[in-house]
């Protein structure tokens, strides 16, 4: 960060008229200046934001607030002028504020529609780059307390994130002024000119050259990709842009986010994977390259700086080498992380280095672009607003479609109502119907990927009734060895390495191991870069979800060492029920067990009762966790997938205890818990809570019942049953497992592939034994297989009679611990469940 404090050179530091000075342009500014020279006034070089404001806006106070913003941020007083054949920034001491006000409150009819039309007109008005400010503000009054503020700027001095920064600061400054207080924001520690100077410092220039070499290698022999246009490209034609919008259902957005977390990626990675597959299917090409943009604000100090930091990256994938969806998802993640880790090379330099054949009719290298819209909630205020109620609120920050550098530019915009897809396209090449169909196909592909229902009542091919349908194709489940690192190893060395990377990337040499990454100034893109650095330095796989859930150096290192883990993953999910269907079941897995366990029960219940399975994929920390807290994590995961409707839960063995507590928490929160099914699940404190005499009788009856079950198994299966049980005991024995771990570390044995399962089982056992159930008034079905001992001294409800106030029990045929899931056992369970549902 020392480069940020360097003074600019004397040649670029001379003043103009005593109130202006010039500094060098950044790479991004140089590019925008060149584009403006080629296409003067091109509206695709504009950032046209629309701030929806709730509260009565005073025009005089509004203009005062913007003048403070202009004084505060040098970029808002900057023009781009040519000197000696190269562009430079000219930063003025003072500039006027271009402001206009239009009152639409008395207009009959669709005032908002008229406001949008004005917004589109404002977005297209050209700027003269030599005249500052390259910003204008228009106030549209829609009503007494409803306004739309149009803030339009040239991309050479502003980007989308800068608009978020300005919106936050405007609301705070306006609030102070309207209360008669003097706004006292801390002066910016950096200005955009500091960044432009740092960008060409020797260290950064050398790093950019290394990144340039990466792009020259990774994009060699690239044939630019394009979606075949509806109309031919013609020389000299005027580029005309239009936009198509599609709002994805909120449920689909939630499913996509849950599926992304399951696979340790961000929703953007998931969306790119879906888009790659869609483009490949439409064109038949396997080698596909699309563009995306990075914020370019990797350093914490840059988050509050107004300016243009965006750089375009090329994402290239080969669909032919990655067959399964999970493989493609992992490949896309690697592609994006590699691209972000080599983002210092400016896009124009990459184009120059590759020297592609340019015909003047196509964008260089990529013609399809995808990006994620920055949102106000993603920023940290640059200063704290004065105390007291703010008289206005920013309720929406949107952008007008002003054109694009690309033929097709797809933007993903998360909203409270669901994800919104906005595709700006070259209307001279593509028909609106073609783009609308592309967005509809994206939604269908997303539904297929995450197992969600299409809004169309017709089922989508790929969702199979009657069975556990996977969120993604079966091959999409990532290998457990990737999700969970081996335990043990040099914990101190690992912590030292992670701590050093953490401090370097956050520019916080004083960071403690317990300081939260995001509270310390980190953000999502920086997190992805930190993950890549850790993986490169340690050789360990670090799922991105683990980084977000850990949050600190200490917790992340504990996770990587196998000492601690974080949470619940959605493993498979069938379609949500249609109107009139019964609510689906959520089955609880306590570890990475066979997700097919519940398939026979799902088939016995029938197609109108869909199934989902949730399981814990990583270890617990009994000293920090409780079963109640673990149940809360499961409950939140279930709510994300099923925000409405009755809850029905199934739990087997240890997971039944967890299912009971999840149901109790749902009921306490007011959700309708239609049924809880506990299969071969003892209340963990049953024997412990009996008085000594009853405990002795119950223990004796339990042992006799277990012996009788053993004899039945011997008569049926012979000696092989005893051998299998002995083998299972040995595999689960902690002493034997510990010995095998030591042999593996010494290089004398292979790693135990079941270790993660048994560790989670041990942890859950400890939580269950420490758990004290509280009564639950909803329907509970206790299922007992033939392996469960029976007798007058034993509670037929397996100890749950004191807590399941509305409980029933049923015995089902089936030998062994999982005997209840025999075909006959599942038929009996399904019949009992159906009878209870009719009451």
Image (cartoon, rainbow, N blue to C red):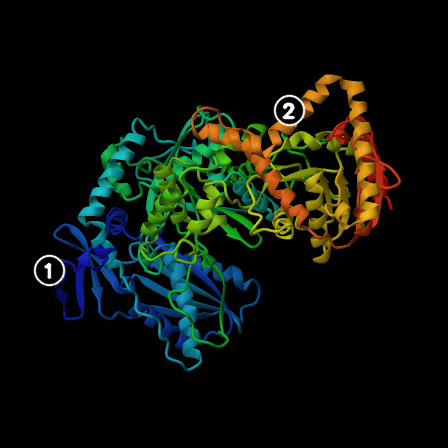
The residue located at (40%, 31%) in the rendering is 317
Please tell me how many numbered marks the rendered image carries: 2
Q: Is residue 211 left or right of residue 628?
A: left
Q: Nearer the viewer, residue 638 or 663?
A: 663
Q: Point out the image quarter for the N terminus.
A: bottom left
Front position among marks 2 and 1: 2
Q: Residues within 10 Å of mark 2 (few under 14, many from 20)?
A: few
Q: Residue furthest left?
A: 11
For residue 568, above or below residue 511 = above
Tell me where residue 721 appears, x and y as whole percent.
72, 21
Tell me where residue 334 appears, x and y as whole percent.
41, 35
For residue 382, above or below residue 823 = below
**Mark 1 highlights which residue?**
10
Is residue 132 visible to the viewer in this orientation of the structure? no
**Mark 2 highlights which residue?**
727
The residue located at (69%, 49%) in the rendering is 662
| Label located before the other in sequence (2 or 1) | 1
Q: Find numbered disc 2 in the image and state the secondary structure of the residue it sits on.
A: helix
Is residue 354 visible to the viewer in this orientation of the structure? yes
Tell me whether circle 2 and circle 1 mark residues in contact (CB < 8 Å). Answer: no
Quarter-wise, where is residue 17 in the image?
bottom left
């Amino acid at each position: 960060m020392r480069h940020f404090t360097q003074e600019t050179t004397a040649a670029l530091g001379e003043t103009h008229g005593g109130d202006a000075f010039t500094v060098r342009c950044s790479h991004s500014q140089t590019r925008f200046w060149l584009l403006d020279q080629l296409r003067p006034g091109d509206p695709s070089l504009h950032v046209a934001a629309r701030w929806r404001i709730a509260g009565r806006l005073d025009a005089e106070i509004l203009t005062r607030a913007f003048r403070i913003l202009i004084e505060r941020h040098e970029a808002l007083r900057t023009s781009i002028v040519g000197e000696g054949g190269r562009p430079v920034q000219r930063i003025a001491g003072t500039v006027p504020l271009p402001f206009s006000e239009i009152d639409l409150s008395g207009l009959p009819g669709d005032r908002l529609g008229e406001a949008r039309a004005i917004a589109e007109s404002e977005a297209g008005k050209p700027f003269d780059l030599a005249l500052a400010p390259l910003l204008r503000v228009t106030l549209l009054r829609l009503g007494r307390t409803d306004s739309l503020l149009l803030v339009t700027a040239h991309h050479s001095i502003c980007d989308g994130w800068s608009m978020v920064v300005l919106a936050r600061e405007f609301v705070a400054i306006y609030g102070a002024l309207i209360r008669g207080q003097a706004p006292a924001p801390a002066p910016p520690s950096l200005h955009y000119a500091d960044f432009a100077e740092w960008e060409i410092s020797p260290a950064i220039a050398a790093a950019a050259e290394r990144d340039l070499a990466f792009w020259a290698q990774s994009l060699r022999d690239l044939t630019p990709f394009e979606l075949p246009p509806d109309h031919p490209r013609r020389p000299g034609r005027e580029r005309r842009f239009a936009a198509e919008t599609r709002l994805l259902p909120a449920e689909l957005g939630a499913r996509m986010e849950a599926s992304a977390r399951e696979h340790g990626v961000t929703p953007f990675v998931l969306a790119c994977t879906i888009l790659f597959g869609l483009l490949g299917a439409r064109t038949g090409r396997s080698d596909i390259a699309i563009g995306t943009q990075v914020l370019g604000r990797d350093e914490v100090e840059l988050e509050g700086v107004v300016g243009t930091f965006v750089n375009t990256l090329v994402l290239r994938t080969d669909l032919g080498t990655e067959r399964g969806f999970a493989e493609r998802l992992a490949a896309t993640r690697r592609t994006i992380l590699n691209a972000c880790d080599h983002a210092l090379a400016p896009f124009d330099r990459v184009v120059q280095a590759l020297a592609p054949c340019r015909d003047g009719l196509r964008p260089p290298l990529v013609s399809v672009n995808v990006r994620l819209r920055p949102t106000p909630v993603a920023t940290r205020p640059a200063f704290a607003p004065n105390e007291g109620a703010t008289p206005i609120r920013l309720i929406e920050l949107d952008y007008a479609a002003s054109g694009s550098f690309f033929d097709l530019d797809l933007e993903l915009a998360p909203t409270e109502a669901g994800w919104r897809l906005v595709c700006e396209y070259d209307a001279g090449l593509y028909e609106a119907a073609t783009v609308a169909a592309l967005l509809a196909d994206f939604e269908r592909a997303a539904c297929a990927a995450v197992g969600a229902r299409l809004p169309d009542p017709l089922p989508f091919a790929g969702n199979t009734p009657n069975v556990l349908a996977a969120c993604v194709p079966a091959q999409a489940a990532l290998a457990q060895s990737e999700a969970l690192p081996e335990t043990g190893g040099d914990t101190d060395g690992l912590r030292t390495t992670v701590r050093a990377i953490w401090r370097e990337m956050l520019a916080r040499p004083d960071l403690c191991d317990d300081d939260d990454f995001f509270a310390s100034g980190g953000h999502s893109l920086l997190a992805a870069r930190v993950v890549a650095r850790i993986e490169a330095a340690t050789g360990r796989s670090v799922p991105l979800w683990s980084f977000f859930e850990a949050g600190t150096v200490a917790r992340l290192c504990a996770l990587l060492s196998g000492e601690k883990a974080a949470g619940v993953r959605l493993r498979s999910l069938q379609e949500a029920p249609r109107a009139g269907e019964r609510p689906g079941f959520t089955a609880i897995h306590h570890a990475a067990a066979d997700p097919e366990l519940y398939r026979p029960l799902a088939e016995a219940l029938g197609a109108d009762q869909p199934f989902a399975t949730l399981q814990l994929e990583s270890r617990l920390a009994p000293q920090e966790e409780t079963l109640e807290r673990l149940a809360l994590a499961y409950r939140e995961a279930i709510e994300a997938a099923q925000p409405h409707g009755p809850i029905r839960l199934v739990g087997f063995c240890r997971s039944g205890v967890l299912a009971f507590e999840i149901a109790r928490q749902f009921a306490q929160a007011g959700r309708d818990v239609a049924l809880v099914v506990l299969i071969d699940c003892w209340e963990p404190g049953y024997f412990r809570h009996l008085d000594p005499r009853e405990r002795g009788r119950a223990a004796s009856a339990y042992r006799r019942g277990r012996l009788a079950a053993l004899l039945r198994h011997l008569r049926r299966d012979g000696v092989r049953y005893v051998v299998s049980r002995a083998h299972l005991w040995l595999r689960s024995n902690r002493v034997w497992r510990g010995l095998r771990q030591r042999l593996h570390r010494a290089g004398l044995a292979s790693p135990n592939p079941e270790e993660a399962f048994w560790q989670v089982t041990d942890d859950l056992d400890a939580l269950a034994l420490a758990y004290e159930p509280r009564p639950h008034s909803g329907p509970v079905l206790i299922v007992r297989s033939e392996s469960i001992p029976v007798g007058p001294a034993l509670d037929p409800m397996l100890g749950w009679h004191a807590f399941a106030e509305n409980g029933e029990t049923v015995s089902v045929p089936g030998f062994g611990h999982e005997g209840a899931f025999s075909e006959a056992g599942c038929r009996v369970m399904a019949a009992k469940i159906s009878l209870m549902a009719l009451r």
